[in-house]
Image (cartoon, helix red, strand yellow):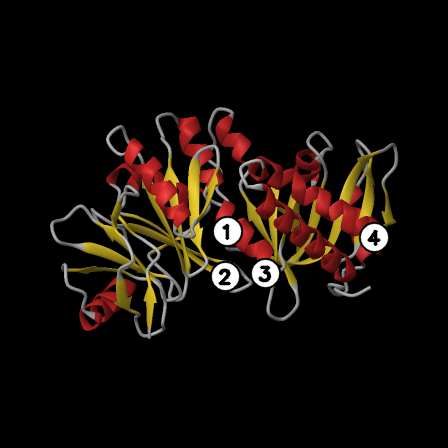
Amino acid sequence: MKWKIPLLIDLNGKVIEKDDEIALLQHQTVVVCFNTGCANEKACISGDNPVISYKKSRYSSDRSIKHRAAFLEKRECSDDLCSYSLQLSSSQKWNFSTTDKALLTWLKELAGIIELSAGTIRGGRQMFCSIENDQTKNDFKATRQALINNGWQCHNLPALSVLHHEFTSDVLCHLKHIDTSVDKIKAMRDILYPLYRDSINHGGILFHAGLIEKEGKGVVLAGRTGAGKSTCCKRLPDQWKTLCDDEILVVLGNDGVYRAHPFPTWSEYLNGGSAKTWNVQYSVPLCGVFFIEQSDLDASVCLGQGKAAFCMNESALQVYRKYWSMVNDDNQRKFLSHLFDNSCEMAKKILAFNLRVSLYGCFWEEIERTLGWQECKHKR
């Protein structure tokens, strides 16, 4: 079986040729080819069975399969290739890769902040990163339009452009520039956008919230900026552990259990730098969602499913709003509808409360009393 490749492009986004038909690899995946900058060589990235393999100008499936096996054994960055992997508890897998020397250090720094594993992971989606420069800027503009004309979707975020196609699971991320430390951090933040969208398309949801853990069980402390999320996280006693205090990705596992992953507080890096890291691959089963309200007394009030769904959706939008202005209206409407549906489904299974928090009280005791901590309750 053969697919017609939507486009053949190089690492800088420049079109090499169009409508090239090549045989699929063993798992019938679409292959997107990139020029590595080396004479007569191309790097091939396969969508559902990710691999970067080097081949001469003539395609050879046997040769590519051998290179695939060799590449999957490679666990560290080389001089011309940098790759890191991420796996969520929902079994979603991503490989972040670049062969652009200008991005090697940047990608290593990103991997350090979110604690990615070195090398690739079998079966993961490929997120391939490149960056424009003065010589390629005009070429990329033309290429982006050519990609769109060939069925690619392009989302222009503040720090990068994300391109994806329905016939391949791979994503192309083209950074605009990383001249300053702020540029670097904004690009790291924006490159998580495809991961967020993919998770939401599989039943997940974002939270503008802190994630706290006790004895392997997770609790979300949600609230708008200034509500007291970070303060609450800092006040917890030793029995509790704070995993993050700003952004959470909750994913739905194949077993029907919601698990929460901590994500970085990017403002700490944007406002003067930070040495903190977040293990985004770590997760805890979600036992409850608490929406913080400042009060004179500590108390919790259970929310009905309708109110819980509304509050969960609003918390997700607080994270997603920094992206949605970059998405066209049709895609935005579909995505927001999907996000709301996910909120409604989560509200059926996860207990949600208003948590009234006093300045000096022990609000965590109220959480423990409310949930009971005998077991995670995923049904009302």
How crowded pointer 2 is (Cα within 10 Å; few <14, some 14-19, many 20+) is rated as some
User: Which amino acid, mark 3?
Assistant: His
Q: Position of residue 114 (x, y in %)?
A: 46, 46
Which callout, 3 or 2, points at the residue further toward the start of the chain? 2
Q: Residue at x 53, y 37 (%)?
A: 326
Kindly report the distance in space between the C-alpha atoms of the residues bearing marks 4 and 3.
22 Å
User: Which amino acid, mark 2?
Assistant: Gln
User: Which amino acid, mark 1?
Assistant: Leu
Q: In the rendered image, is residue 245 in sight?
A: no
Residue 329 lies left or right of residue 278; in this view the side is right
Residue that label 2 marks: 92
Corner quadrant of residue 342 = bottom right
Residue that label 1 marks: 195
Which callout, 4 or 2, points at the residue further toward the start of the chain? 2
Residue 187 lies left or right of residue 57; in this view the side is right
User: Which amino acid, mark 4?
Assistant: Gly
Disc sitting over residue 306 in the figure: 4
- Name the front one of labels 4 and 2: 4
Count the marks.
4
Residue 267 lies left or right of residue 216; in this view the side is left
How crowded pointer 4 is (Cα within 10 Å; few <14, some 14-19, many 20+) is rated as few
Contact between marks 1 and 4 (CB within 8 A): the answer is: no
Q: Position of residue 330 (x, y in %)?
A: 59, 46
Q: Residue at x 35, y 38 (%)?
A: 106
Q: Nearer the viewer, residue 335 or 105?
A: 335
Which callout, 1 or 4, points at the residue further toward the start of the chain? 1
Residue that label 3 marks: 202
Which callout, 4 or 3, points at the residue further toward the start of the chain? 3
